[in-house]
Structure formats: structure tokens, C-alpha cells
Image: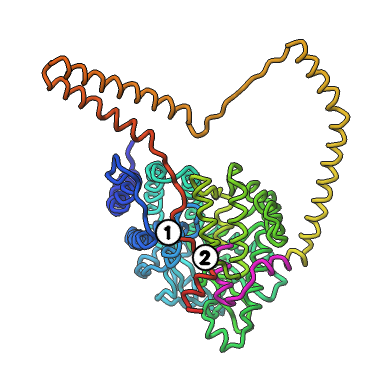
């Protein structure tokens, strides 16, 4: 049965497809210059920037759901090249507010008449976002901020999520295996995230939990929710004004130590992720402010996440490996977290990680060294083996955005040093060292046991070999479909040869030339298929390397 939601989704799919059609055509021609055949074509960074700007305009035109999708994509380097990330990072969750009368209906459905629910209520919103907007009011003698869900957003989001789900199988045809993996996780993550963000009851619960974890910390401020004036579509909180954290000029006028502010922000997020297991996941400058005492104010807990204990342990191991510049430990942690393919070339990835650590430390990197590593990546693997499971996507978003805020506050901010000091002060580093010693002891014990148990088993195996009583089972894994491609090439070659031979015989024996031409016509498509099957497909990284701090210094002319 076709429901109204489905009809709206079908219509939205057509609208979205029409908007994305120019990009679809461009990407199709990148794979095959003439759509169905021809060599693939290279795309320069300048062309990528132009396409990213078209994508940005398309997302803005399609409305709230796609604005949110663009924000999420801007934190996914496993899906988009750096040029796209740079352009989409400018996408702000800032859209014109809904008319007051529409918002009033939502408010009164949740709380009753506005003038009875609040002592005073300012009808002009102080901020407008894609999913909701915020108003100022007075309640119980104090100033409060009232967050109201945008009217009618539920139906639009439901339809758009269906469109995104239907589009994923199409998009995966234009990307590699690793990116297809990330796209699948992106669709699930996006649907879960946006639905959670529309549920203000959940946001209230997350706000309360995170606030309780920092009760004794005077360096941060989290607004207190007003429970009897909140509901699934309305969230009322105490109003906490402050200066936007990226307004460095005003912070300097307030005599705020920006380095200490950056350290505090980084340590707060480390505690959220590796200690508490619940975190504020949208730390862009619009959601962070600084009060007159220098405390950091956190707004908007609609996008928040949780980290399970296993992932917490692996993140700690990752940070400690980074602090010790233990490249093997870094790669092992990434594999265990599911963010790096176990089949990745470790030598190449080790070089990539060394460059990444140098960049995070703010060191200058010689361009020839960057190019050398990129060339290694292109020569040894078909696609970059990094991917993001759903449980790690928000963690990466936080790490990326927080570092950007910290570098804005202090251009020389050393993320690794702060993380190392935090892990040492909280005992994580010492505890991990103890765990390594214990693991080594257990491994030594297992090795000793094997020295006793293996020789008898080896002797029995040698006896079976002597009696010729050993059966060996061999299983060949063909993950890259090598045998399938080989069989197709053999079949195409045979058909092509037979076709050419038939055409030659028909022509040589004086039959009507049209029969020979017909045989050639039938043979040519087979020849085309043979040609395409013999092409060597390479999907290396073609983007120009971009490193955050170095790029910032170059743009500033330092």
C-alpha cells in the first residue's frame, strides 16, 4: 500500500535526483570518459573544489535534512577527498526561522498557552537551525532559553531519510570497497543521529547525565534543564550567555588565557570519551561560548553519543601509542577498532601515520616527503584502507572539530602533549603499561606450555606422513574475483577469435560481403568487452595532500 509518506518520498527522490544529476554525470564520466567506454579521466584539486561548491549549493537548496547530511559528510575523510571536506566544513546549521505562529502551535501542543506557561516570552528567535530554533523567555524569575522543534520537520525528515536509503546502492557504484563500507555505515548513522536530535526528551537526558559528570568542574558550564517546561518537542533550559569561543579578539580583551582554554576543552572531551562514555558530539564554535570567568559554556546536546568500554580501551591504547610514537601500536589499535583494514600495507600506513603525527605536533613537513608517501599509497593499494564503523564516526567528528577549535584559540596547540599529560595524570598510561607487562607474562606462559605439548603432536604428525595417511584440504579465497575475471577473459577471447575467423572465411570464399560485415558487427561488442576486462583499474588517491596546520600557515602567509 502506497502511503502519503511514500508518495512524498518518491517526489523528494525525483527532486534530489534532478539536483544531483550534474554531479552524477560528471562522476560517471570520471570512470569512463564516454560513459560506457573509454579510459577514466583524472580530476584536479581545482575541479574537485568546483564540484564541492556545487554540492554545497545543492545541499543548501534541498533543505534541513541535507544540510545535516552535509555537516556529517564534512567530518568523513573516509568518504570525501580533502577538497570536499574543506568546502563542506563551511556549512553552518543556520537557516531562516519558521514563522512565530507555526512555532506557537508546537509550544502550545506541548505546554499549553504560551502566556500561561511562561512569565514572559520573546516572539523573535535568537537562533535558527535546521531542526529547531531557540527563543528567550522568563520563568520562575529567571531568564531561560526555549528550544522548539521546527514545525512539520518530522514528515520531511522521514521522506528524506528514505531518499538517502534508496540512493546508497546507486552511490556505491561510483566508489571503492572501503568507501562503500563507510557509505553504508553513514546512512545508518545519519538516520539514527537525526532522529535522536529531534527527540528533545533524549537531549534533556543526555544533558543531565553529562552535566552530572562535571558537577565539581568549575571550568565548564552546562545549562540546567527546566523539567516542567520541557517535552519531546520543547526543551527549556537556564539561559547562559557568553562570548563565542572563536571570537579571539574579544577573548583577548577579556584577558582570557586562550592556551589554557584550549587545554581545558581538550581535557573535557578526553574525559567524556575515555572516562564517562557519553559525550557532546557537536563542538563547533556556535555551540561553545566563554563566560566572564573564563569558563566554557556548552550548548545544544541534540547531537551526542556514547562509547562502549571496549572502544574506550582501544582509544586509550591509540592515544598512548601516539604519545610514545609507537607506529605499530597505532596501527594495531586502528585495526582492532575497525577503522583500518587488516589487509592494509603496514609499511605504507606507517609512513602515513608518521606524517599525521608530525602535522598534529605542528611540525613543518617537506613537500617532497608528502609526495613520496602519496606515491607509495598509489603504487601499493587500490583504495585508501581507512573506514569508519558507526560507533566511531561521532568520535572522529569530535576529535576533528575540537582540534580545529583548539588551533583557532592557540595556533601552536599540541594535541598530543595535552593528551599525553592527561593520560599520565589520570593513571591511564601507567595502567596500560601494567597491562602490557601482564599480557607479555601470559604470552610467555602459553609459549612455555607449547614447548611441552607441541613435540608429541609433531611426532604423531610425522608418523602419519610416513604412513602416507595425511589428507590436506586447501581452500582458495578469491576476494578480488581473480578467477572470475580470468574466466571471462578466456571466454571473450575465444568468442572474439571465432568471430574474426568466421568473418574472414565468409569474405575469402566470395560470399556476399554483407555476411562478413554482419559477422564483424556481432564480434565487435565482444571485442569491446574483452578490452574492458583487460584494462587495469587503479583507484589510487588523486587528491593533493592537505595538512591542517601547514595549510593554515600557508594561507596566512606565515
Q: Within the image, what quadrant is residue 403 found in? A: bottom right
Magenta span? 399-421
Residue 185 lies, in percent from the top left, at: 51, 47
Residue at horizontal 58 percent and vertical 79 percent from the top = 290
Residue at horizontal 63 percent and vertical 50 percent from the top = 334
Residue that numbered label 1 is attached to: 70
Above-or-below relation of 27 to 260: above
Q: Are marks 2 and 1 in contact (CB under 8 Å)?
A: no
The quarter of the rendered structure image containing the N terminus is top left
Tell me if 440 is positioned left or right of 246 in this view: right
Work out how far the residue at label 2 is from the one at label 1, CA to CA, in angstroms.
30 Å
Residue that numbered label 2 is attached to: 367
Residue 266 lies, in percent from the top left, at: 64, 69
Residue 195 lies, in percent from the top left, at: 48, 53
Whether residue 39 appears in this view of the structure is: yes
Number of other residues with Cα within 10 Å of mark 1, as a class: few under 14, some 14 to 19, many 20 or more: many
Above-or-below relation of 47 to 490: below
Please state which of residues 460 and 155 is positioned toward the viewer in this rendering.
Answer: 460
Please state which of residues 167 and 361 is positioned toward the viewer in this rendering.
Answer: 361
Q: Secondary structure at mark 1?
A: helix
Above-or-below relation of 323 to 253: above
Amino acid at each position: 500500500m502506497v502511503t502519503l509518506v511514500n508518495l512524498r518520498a518518491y517526489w523528494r527522490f525525483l527532486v534530489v535526483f534532478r539536483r544531483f544529476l550534474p554531479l552524477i554525470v560528471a562522476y560517471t564520466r570520471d570512470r569512463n570518459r564516454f560513459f560506457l567506454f573509454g579510459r577514466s579521466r583524472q580530476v584536479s584539486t581545482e575541479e574537485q573544489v568546483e564540484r564541492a561548491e556545487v554540492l554545497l549549493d545543492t545541499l543548501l537548496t534541498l533543505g534541513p535534512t541535507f544540510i545535516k547530511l552535509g555537516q556529517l559528510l564534512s567530518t568523513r575523510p573516509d568518504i570525501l577527498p580533502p577538497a570536499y571536506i574543506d568546502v563542506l566544513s563551511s556549512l553552518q546549521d543556520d537557516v531562516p526561522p519558521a514563522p512565530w505562529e507555526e512555532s506557537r502551535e508546537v509550544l502550545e501542543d506541548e505546554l499549553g498557552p504560551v502566556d500561561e506557561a511562561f512569565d514572559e516570552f520573546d516572539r523573535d528567535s535568537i537562533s535558527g537551525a535546521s531542526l529547531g530554533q531557540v527563543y528567550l523567555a522568563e520563568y520562575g524569575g529567571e531568564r531561560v532559553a526555549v528550544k522548539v522543534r521546527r514545525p512539520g520537520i518530522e514528515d520531511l525528515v522521514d521522506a528524506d531519510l528514505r531518499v538517502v536509503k534508496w540512493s546508497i546502492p546507486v552511490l556505491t557504484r561510483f566508489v571503492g570497497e572501503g568507501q562503500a563500507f563507510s557509505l553504508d555505515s553513514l546512512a545508518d548513522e545519519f538516520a539514527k543521529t537525526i532522529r535522536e536530535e529531534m527527540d528533545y526528551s533524549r537531549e534533556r537526558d543526555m544533558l543531565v547525565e553529562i552535566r552530572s559528570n562535571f558537577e565539581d568542574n568549575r571550568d565548564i558550564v552546562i545549562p540546567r534543564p527546566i523539567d516542567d517546561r520541557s517535552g519531546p518537542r520543547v526543551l527549556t533550559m537556564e539561559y547562559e550567555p557568553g562570548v563565542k569561543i572563536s571570537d579571539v579578539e574579544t577573548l583577548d580583551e577579556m584577558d582570557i588565557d586562550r592556551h589554557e582554554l584550549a587545554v581545558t576543552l581538550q581535557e573535557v572531551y578526553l574525559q567524556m570519551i575515555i572516562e564517562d562514555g557519553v559525550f557532546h558530539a557537536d563542538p563547533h564554535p556556535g555551540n561553545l561560548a566563554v563566560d566572564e570567568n573564563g569558563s566554557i559554556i556548552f550548548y545544544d546536546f541534540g547531537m551526542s553519543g556514547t562509547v562502549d568500554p571496549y572502544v574506550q580501551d582501544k582509544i586509550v591504547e591509540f592515544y598512548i601509542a601516539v604519545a610514545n610514537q609507537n607506529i605499530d601500536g597505532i596501527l594495531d589499535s586502528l585495526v582492532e577498532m575497525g577503522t583500518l583494514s587488516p589487509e592494509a600495507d603496514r609499511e605504507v600506513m606507517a609512513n602515513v601515520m608518521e606524517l599525521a603525527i608530525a602535522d598534529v605536533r605542528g611540525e613543518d613537513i617537506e613537500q617532497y616527503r608528502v609526495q613520496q608517501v602519496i606515491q607509495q599509497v598509489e603504487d601499493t593499494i587500490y583504495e585508501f584502507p581507512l573506514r569508519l564503523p558507526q560507533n566511531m564516526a561521532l568520535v572522529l567528528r569530535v576529535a576533528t572539530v575540537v582540534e580545529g577549535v583548539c588551533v583557532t584559540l592557540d595556533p601552536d596547540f599540541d594535541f598530543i602533549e595535552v593528551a599525553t599529560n592527561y593520560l599520565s595524570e589520570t593513571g591511564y598510561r601507567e595502567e596500560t603499561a601494567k597491562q602490557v607487562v601482564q599480557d607479555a607474562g601470559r604470552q610467555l606462559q602459553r609459549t612455555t606450555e607449547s614447548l611441552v605439548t607441541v613435540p608429541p603432536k609433531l611426532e604423531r604428525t610425522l608418523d602419519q606422513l610416513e604412513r602416507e595417511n595425511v589428507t590436506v584440504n586447501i581452500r582458495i579465497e578469491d576476494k578480488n574475483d581473480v578467477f572470475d575475471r580470468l574466466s571471462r577473459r578466456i571466454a571473450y577471447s575465444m568468442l572474439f577469435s571465432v568471430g574474426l575467423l568466421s568473418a574472414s572465411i565468409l569474405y575469402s570464399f566470395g560470399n556476399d560481403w554483407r555476411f562478413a560485415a554482419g559477422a564483424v558487427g556481432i564480434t565487435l561488442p565482444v571485442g569491446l568487452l574483452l578490452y574492458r576486462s583487460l584494462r587495469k583499474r587503479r583507484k589510487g588517491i588523486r587528491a593533493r595532500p592537505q595538512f591542517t596546520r601547514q595549510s593554515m600557515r600557508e594561507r596566512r602567509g606565515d
